[in-house]
Amino acid sequence: MRGVIVAMVFVWFACTTVTSEDKGTKSSTATPSSKADSRDSTSLSPQEPAAKIEFDKMEHDFGKIREGEKASYRFRVKNPGTVPLRITDVKPSCGCTVPAWTKEPIPPGGEGFVEVIFDSQGRSGEQLKTVTVFANTDPPTHLLRFRGIVIPK
C-alpha cells in the first residue's frame, strides 16, 4: 500500500508545474491528457489582465432564404474593459460558414465586429449554426449562434 502511495505522489509531481531557475520564471509542463491547440494564442500571462467583451446580441435569425443564397450578419463587439481586446480566432461549426472579424486590437471603449457568412447551397430546412470566438478574455471563448430556414429550389 505504501508503495502505491509513493508511486501516486511521484506521478502527481511529474504532472504538475515545473519551476525553472533560469531567470526566476515559471513554466508549466502539460499533462499527457491536456490538449492545447497551438493556434490558440488566447492564454493570458500572469501579468496581463483579462480584457472584457460584449456583443450586441448572441444569436441572429436570418429568417427564410432560398437554397443557394448567401446570408450574412455582422455581430457588433464592444470593449467595455480597461485593456485592449484581441480577437485571436473565430471558428465556425461547419464549412458552410465563413467568418471575418476585427484583426487589430480593440481599444478600451472601442468597437469591432465578428461577421458570419452562411452559404445555403446544398442545405434545406431549419439551420442552426455557431461560431466560437477566441479572445484574450476570461473565459477565452464565446459562442455566437445564427439560424434560418432554407427553402429548397
Image (spheres, rainbow, N blue to C red):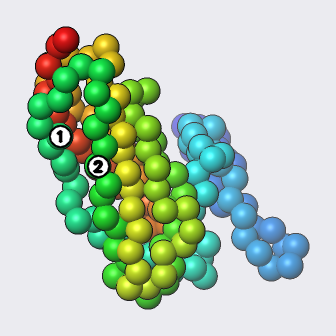
Mark carried by residue 105: none
- Residue occupying image coordinates x 38% and y 85%: 109
* Callout 1 amino acid: Phe
Closer to the camera, 130 or 102?
102
Q: Which numbered tag is attached to residue 62?
A: 1
Mark 2 vs 1, N-terminal side: 1
Pointer 1: residues within 10 angstroms few (<14), some, or many (20+)?
some
Q: Quadrant of residue 130?
A: top left
The quarter of the rendered structure image containing the C terminus is top left
The quadrant the N terminus occupies is: top right
**Can you give x and y, in whole percent of width and height, for residue 79 in the image?**
38, 77
Determine the secondary structure under disc 1.
strand
Depth check, front residue: 118 or 22: 118
Query: Which dot marks residue 73?
Result: 2
Q: Are marks 2 and 1 in contact (CB under 8 Å)?
A: yes
Q: How many marks?
A: 2
State the residue lying farthest toward the right: 22
Q: Give the residue type at disc 2.
A: Tyr
Helix or strand or loop: what does disc 2 sit on?
strand
The residue that appears at 44% across and 38% down in the rendered structure is: 98
Q: Nearer the viewer, residue 49 or 143?
A: 143
Mark 2 is surrounded, within 10 Å at the Cα level, by few (under 14), some (14 to 19) or many (20 or more) other residues, namely some
- Drawn side of residue 5 relative to residue 73, left or right: right
Q: Residue at x 17, y 29 (%)?
A: 65
Q: Quadrant of residue 41?
A: bottom right
Q: Position of residue 96 (x, y in %)?
A: 38, 27
